[in-house]
Image (spheres, rainbow, N blue to C red):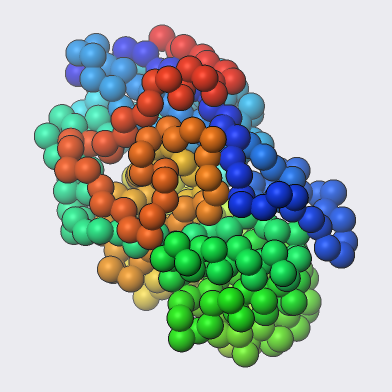
Amino acid sequence: MNIQHIELIRLSIPFSAGTVQRQTVGQAQDDDAFNAASPRHRRMESLMIKVTTDSGQVGWGEAFGHGANPATVTALQAMVAPLFIGTACDQHLRTLETARRALHGFGSTGPVMYALSGIDMALWDLAAQAAGKPLYDYLGGQPRALELYASLVSYGGDPDEVFRQVRRARDQGFRKIKLHETRYEAIAAAREALPATDGELMVDVNCPWSVAQACDMAERLRTLDLTWLEEPVWPPDDAHGLARVRQAGVPLSAGENAAGVNGLRALFEQGAIDVAQPSVAKVGGITAMLQVFELAREYGVKVVPHCFYFGPGLLAVAHLCTLLPADVAVEVPFIEFERLLYPALDFKPRLTLAAVPGLGFAPDQEVIERYCIERVLIS
Ligand SMILES: [Mg+2]
């Protein structure tokens, strides 16, 4: 079974975050056009990769993502996808390694790596299908009803709105909730809405602070009993800086912006984080995620994958989470899409993966036709 052609499908679907008008309190955020959790967004993108074999089998992947999609599409079309056309599916790991070596000069993260990640995912989907097993089973995971955690968009630092949204998520049954807020007042309001006795609160601040600022903020946040504080330090790969902030006693998480498996390794070696967050559509696909899981086990660091996806990437993360301890929840964006690409996107606090071979990604073709903004065929 060889790869015959690869299709790229870029979707853009409008969503609601449950508020009439999201406001920005305090400093205007002019630098967040590429931040997927920014309050300015009204649509969310997925860059889906459909790999078709000469026997008509279809495997799906997703490459990161959001504002970088035009660059990732170009990387896929011009450089990455042609390396896989005509190759044997059962040699997928060898082909991936060859492609990775051929392209190593273009970085261990960024659009070329995102492209490789997406194709790797589709090839694992095909491999599990060929074996007649659901991907979780093929990977050796334990089937279970996976807990989801609600990853809220930014409400621009407005404490009242944050309180209301956290309550809304809690009322829908979510007991693990993550904010994208940087103001102490907004984070404290969330804790009030979800007391520690009632659920877990995580805060993703997206790398805003110097090490000194992050240490101060961590000191302030300590009494709020956060499950983790995510990416407090600029730049995101400052492992030494993170290790210093960690001394403040608030658990830290990072890893979605790590440069591949070795980027995660650097965080482990520095004792920089309590929770590792590799991102399947960025770090090198399922192949790299399995390597990170192994490394994290060696270093005794918990893994909770990053997942701000709604295409095949979300399902890939769910399958991978069956390899992790039962308290690891799958991140899902706390938004309502205008139309659902597949039924599981009507997020409930629990997700059960379909017991069908492969990834089980069965998108609504009508939704694809309606929201497709770019389509490229590589053969
Ligand atoms: Mg994050």
Residue placed at 39% from the left, 21% from the top?
Answer: 365
Asked if one can make out residue 238 in the rendered structure from this viewpoint, the answer is no
Query: Most extreme residue toward the bottom, as rendered?
Result: 223
Residue 173 figure quarter: bottom left
* Image x and y of residue 129, in percent: 18, 32
Rendered position, 344 above or below 131: below
Total labels drawn: 0
Q: Nearer the viewer, residue 188 or 30?
A: 188
* Image x and y of residue 352, in percent: 26, 52
185 relative to 286 in the view: left or right: right
Query: Most extreme residue toward the left, as rendered?
Result: 132
Residue placed at 46% from the left, 29% from the top?
Answer: 48
Rendered position, 86 above or below 35: above
Q: Nearer the viewer, residue 55 or 331?
A: 331
* Image x and y of residue 301, in percent: 41, 73
Residue placed at 54% from the left, 35% from the top?
Answer: 338
Asked if one can make out residue 191 in the rendered structure from this viewpoint, the answer is yes
Rendered position, 21 above or below 197: above
* Image x and y of residue 339, in percent: 49, 33
Residue 161 figure quarter: bottom right
143 relative to 100 in the view: left or right: left
Residue placed at 63% from the left, 29% from the top?
Answer: 71
Image quadrant holding the C terminus, namely top left
Rendered position, 107 above or below 188: above
Image quadrant holding the N terminus, namely top left
